[in-house]
Amino acid sequence: MFRSLVLRGLALVLVSGLPAARALETELPNEAATHLSTLGRAPDWSELDQYQSTITHDEFVHLLDFVYATHGYSGDLIKVEAEEARILTKDGTEDYFVLQFAKSPSDRLPLVHWGSAPDKLPRATGDKPLAGFHIALDPGHLGGEWAKMEERWFKIGEAAPVREGDLTLRVAQMLKPRLESLGAKVSLVRNNSEPTTPYRPSDFEEIARRLLQEAGIADPRENFDGPADPEKEKTIAWQRELLFYRNSEIRRRASLVNYQLQPDLVLCLHFNAEPWGDPNDPTLSEKNHLHLLVNGSYLPNEIELDDERCEMLHKLLSRSFPEELAMAEAMATTMAKATGLPPYRYKTENVTSIGATGYVYARNLMATRLYRCPTVYLEPYVMNSEEVFERVKAGDYEGLKLIAGKKRPSIFREYVDGVVEGLMAYFKDTRPLR
C-alpha cells in the first residue's frame, strides 16, 4: 500500500563511521502495522546490546518506575527479574530482548555515551567554559506561510502576524553566537522558515485515508473550512497536513540530529500558547508561564507500540536523564529569574513533575524521544498573552523599554540570557576549569 510513497523522494543518509543500520534515514512511512507508531519503523533491538551489564537491577527499576513508565506498564511487555529484564520485541509474538543486569555498581561495564558529557571533557578556561561541547539548536515548528498550516500563528489588527516558528528561529540565531563566544560548537537543526523534510502533505494522501478508515470514518471529506472547523480532524486534508508537519518533519530533524550533526546536547526552542480561537480574530490571554521538558512519562498505550518501547529503552539505558534533568533545572532557575514567570501547571495526566524547581516535567514528545543525545525542550512565554504580544511587537532592541507598564529588555535577549546563564551555571558545577 505504501510502497510508492516509500520510493518517492527516498534518500538514504550515509555518514562515514556509522554502522549501516544506524545510518538509515528514519523518516520512512511505516508498513500497515498495528503495533508501530504513525510513520514509525520496526526497531532494531540489537542496538540495545551495547547496554548489556551497564546498569544494575535497582537502577533500571528506579528509572523505569519514576521517570519513564510512571503511569505503569504491562508485565507482558517488560518482565523485570533479579538478573535480567525481558522486553517483548514485537507484540503478538513470544520474541524477547534480554537485558542482563550488572550484579553491582562496581561490576557495571563501561557505558558508551552518545556524545560528550560535560564532566568528561578536558579542563576548560574560564572564558571558554563550553569549549569542546557541541550544542544543536532546534527552533520549534515552521515559519513563514507554513505557520498557518501548523496553526502556530495569529494576527491582530495591522500588526505583523505572530508566528512561533519565526520567533524560535530568531532566538536560535541570537543564541548561536553567544554560545560560540563561550567556546561551544553550535549547529542549527533548521536555519530558515522552510521544512527540513523532503515530503509534502500530498505525499501522505494514502496514509491519511487509512488512518481515517481505521478510526471508523469510511467516507471522509476531502477538505476542511479553516482552523475553526469543528470537524477538521475527520478530513483527509487535515490528516495529511498533520502527518507532514508534526510527524515527518520531526522524524527528519531526528535523522539530521542523530546521523549528521551528532551533537552532545539538543535544545528545542519553543514559545507556549493558550487557546486563541480564530487566528484572524484571536483572544489574548492574561496567562503567562514557563516550563521545560525532558523525555519520560510514557503512557501505557505508548509503551505497547514496538518502536516507542524500544526508543524508551534507548533513552533509559543511555542514562541521558540525569544530565537532561540537571541542565533543565539549571536553565529553569535562571529563566525563572530572568522572566519572573510562574511555572506552568499541566491539567493533563501525560506528564510527571520531576526535579526540585517545579518548572520541569517529563513527557513523551517525539523530539525528546527520537533525539538520542541529551535533549531539553524549552517552553517559556505564552505568545498570545497580552504582555508577550506587546513585547513581540516591539521586536529586538538594546537596553530597556517601557512595555505593558514595565521597563523590560527585548524578549528575545531575555530568552537567550536565561538559556546562556543556565548552561553556564550547569557547566560551572560539572566541568573542571583550569
Image: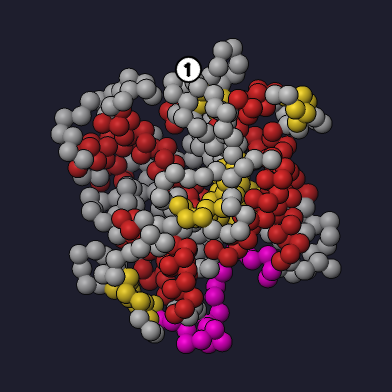
Quadrant in which the N terminus appears = top left
- In percent of width and height, residue 354 lies at 54, 58
Left or right placement of residue 425 versus residue 99 in this view: right
Quadrant of res 139? top right
Quadrant of res 80? bottom left
Residue at x-position 51% and y-position 86%: 104
Highlighted magenta segment, given as a residue range = 100-120
Residue at x-position 41% and y-position 46%: 348
Q: Provide the major secondary structure of the magenta segment.
A: loop
- Amino acid type, mark 1: Asn
User: Total marks drawn?
Assistant: 1
Residue at x-position 43% and y-position 68%: 64
From this view, report whether residue 112 is shown above or below residue 12.
Answer: below
Return the residue found at the far top. 158
Residue at x-position 32% and y-position 19%: 225
Disc 1 designates what residue? Answer: 280
- In percent of width and height, residue 82 lies at 38, 84
From this view, report whether residue 53 is shown above or below residue 320.
Answer: below
- In percent of width and height, residue 220 lies at 20, 29
> Circle 1 — which element?
loop
Q: Is residue 105 magenta?
A: yes
- In percent of width and height, residue 8 lies at 33, 41
For residue 134, say whether it is visible. no
